[in-house]
Image (cartoon, rainbow, N blue to C red):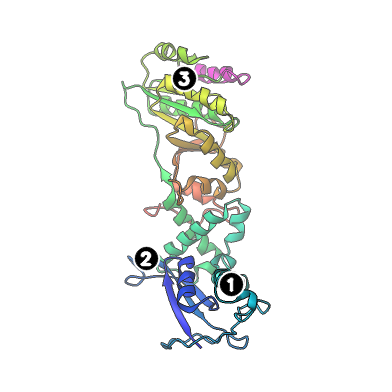
């Protein structure tokens, strides 16, 4: 029997090579992820697949010797006992080759999922799915975790140890985070920052926290401006914060009032703009918000999102608020969510999207205490509800 080893960048490419060189009736015997280069360093992560043919219902044992390829008998059946053989008229050579090829390979995958799909045995798959992480992101994250383990020479038993596997996953996700740092101001130079987002995510409270931090700790002159005239008591809430901190504040009801309101704030170093909550599915409201922002000419626009939101809702919000051209994200309510995996799956980089810059996180209602510059330990430390933070981050973050 013929046993051959294939190496490729991913499993799909390896299977394509097997199909081309051995035909559609070859069976996958074993798969593993490897890394080339010296001792696994400075190399590429690849998939190694061992394939062969089945004889009388039994797989031949993998051999390390280099065997010559034998001619396949024309009645070899696929791995499924009930699949049609090559000699079946409905699966004869010719026009039906491609259909038979795909059909046979699909059968082998369903029977050998534990060997061909690393997700079948990874202890973190279940918790990640329960946390609402989409399947493509789970695959990408776990592949990154495996690559991280290989880099540190710790990949032999990591997939079977949930604690160690989680640590590798945390570090892998931390490397995907885009942490842009805090708002930066200079005395005597006006810097305008707007906070936007859906309703109920804590924009007004976050404005108050930022204002208090810059006023008390950074010793900056801060002015507040609100265009949130829709929500009941929204103006009064922000005005109460302004009076407590002795800050100037202006209310803008239409874009044409923006410039005069800015002038009335006086000589301030930082202007913080509070906006009304908008549904990401309301194009008219988003366009109206964008018009206000064009009049304000903000230097930064922070999209405020709740950590309690699902991955799907976060992606919907990012898409819906695209017209306002947010420069970064503030993630609120970390104290109200049992995990951050779902929300981070929408904010980290993927094959199609760059990772979203994260500026601040909030973890409570106290002004000004419960806000911090976004960092990897806080974000991935509560990645899953199964364990608390398991790793401290230094250069790896």
Label 1 to label 3, Cα distance in Å? 68 Å
Is 245 magenta? The answer is yes
Q: Quadrant of residue 81?
A: bottom right
Q: Of label 1 and label 3, which has the lower sequence position? A: 1
What number of labels is visible? 3
Looking at marks 1 and 2 on the same chain, the residue that comes earlier in the sequence is marked by 2
Image height check: is 156 above or below 392?
A: below
The residue at which mark 1 appears reads as 100
Q: Main secondary structure of the magenta part?
A: helix
Q: Is residue 147 magenta?
A: no
For label 2, the residue is 44
What residue is disc 3 on? 224
Q: Secondary structure at mark 1?
A: helix
Q: Which residues are magenta?
A: 229-247
Secondary structure, mark 2, is loop
Q: Residue at x 60, y 50 (%)?
A: 132
Q: Say whether marks 1 and 2 touch (CB < 8 Å).
A: no
**Measuring 45% from the left and 81% from the top, which residue is drawn there?**
4
Query: Of helix, strand and loop, which one carries label 3?
Result: strand
Q: Earlier in the sequence, mark 2 or mark 3?
A: 2
Query: Which numbered circle lies on residue 120?
Result: none
Label 1, label 2: how far apart the Cα atoms are: 33 Å
Q: Is residue 161 visible?
A: no
User: Residue drawn at (53%, 27%), measured in percent from left and top?
Assistant: 286
Residue 312 vs residue 6, the one in the foreground? 6
Q: Nearer the viewer, mark 1 or mark 2?
A: 1
Q: Residues within 10 Å of mark 2 (few under 14, many from 20)?
A: few
Q: Residue 16: where, in percent of width, then height?
A: 47, 69
């Amino acid at each position: 029997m013929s046993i051959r080893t294939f190496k490729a960048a991913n499993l799909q490419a390896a299977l394509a090579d097997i199909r081309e060189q051995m035909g559609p009736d070859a069976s996958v015997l074993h798969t593993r992820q490897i890394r080339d280069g010296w001792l696994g360093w400075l190399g590429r992560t690849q998939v190694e697949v061992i394939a062969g043919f089945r004889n009388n219902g039994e797989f031949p044992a993998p051999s390390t010797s280099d065997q010559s390829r034998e001619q396949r008998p024309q009645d070899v059946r696929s791995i499924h006992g009930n699949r049609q053989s090559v000699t079946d008229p409905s699966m004869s050579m010719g026009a039906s080759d491609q259909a038979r090829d795909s059909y046979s390979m699909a059968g082998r995958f369903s029977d050998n999922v534990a060997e061909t799909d690393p997700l079948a045995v990874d202890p973190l798959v279940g918790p990640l799915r329960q946390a609402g992480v989409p399947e493509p992101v789970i695959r990408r994250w776990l592949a990154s975790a495996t690559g991280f383990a290989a880099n540190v020479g710790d990949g032999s038993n990591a997939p079977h140890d949930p604690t160690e596997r989680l640590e590798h996953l945390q570090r892998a996700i931390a490397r995907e985070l885009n942490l842009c740092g805090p708002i930066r101001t200079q005395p005597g130079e006006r810097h305008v920052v707007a906070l936007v987002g859906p309703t109920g995510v804590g924009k007004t409270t976050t404005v108050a926290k930022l204002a208090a931090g810059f006023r008390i700790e950074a010793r900056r002159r801060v002015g507040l401006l609100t265009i949130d005239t829709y929500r009941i008591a929204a103006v009064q809430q922000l005005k109460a914060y302004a009076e407590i901190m002795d800050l100037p504040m202006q209310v803008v009801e239409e874009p044409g009032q923006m410039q005069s309101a800015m002038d009335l704030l006086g000589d301030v170093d930082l202007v913080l703009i509070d906006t009304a909550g908008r549904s990401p599915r309301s194009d008219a409201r988003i366009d109206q918000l964008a018009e206000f922002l064009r009049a304000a000419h903000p230097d930064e626009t922070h999209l405020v999102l709740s950590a309690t939101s699902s991955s799907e809702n976060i992606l919907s919000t990012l898409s819906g608020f695209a017209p306002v051209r947010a420069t970064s994200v503030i993630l609120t309510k970390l104290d109200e969510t049992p995990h951050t995996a779902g929300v981070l799956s929408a904010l980290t980089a993927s094959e199609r999207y760059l990772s979203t810059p994260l500026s601040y996180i909030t973890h409570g209602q106290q002004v000004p205490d419960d806000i911090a510059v976004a960092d990897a330990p806080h974000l991935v430390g509560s990645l899953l509800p199964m364990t608390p933070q398991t790793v401290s981050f230094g250069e790896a973050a």
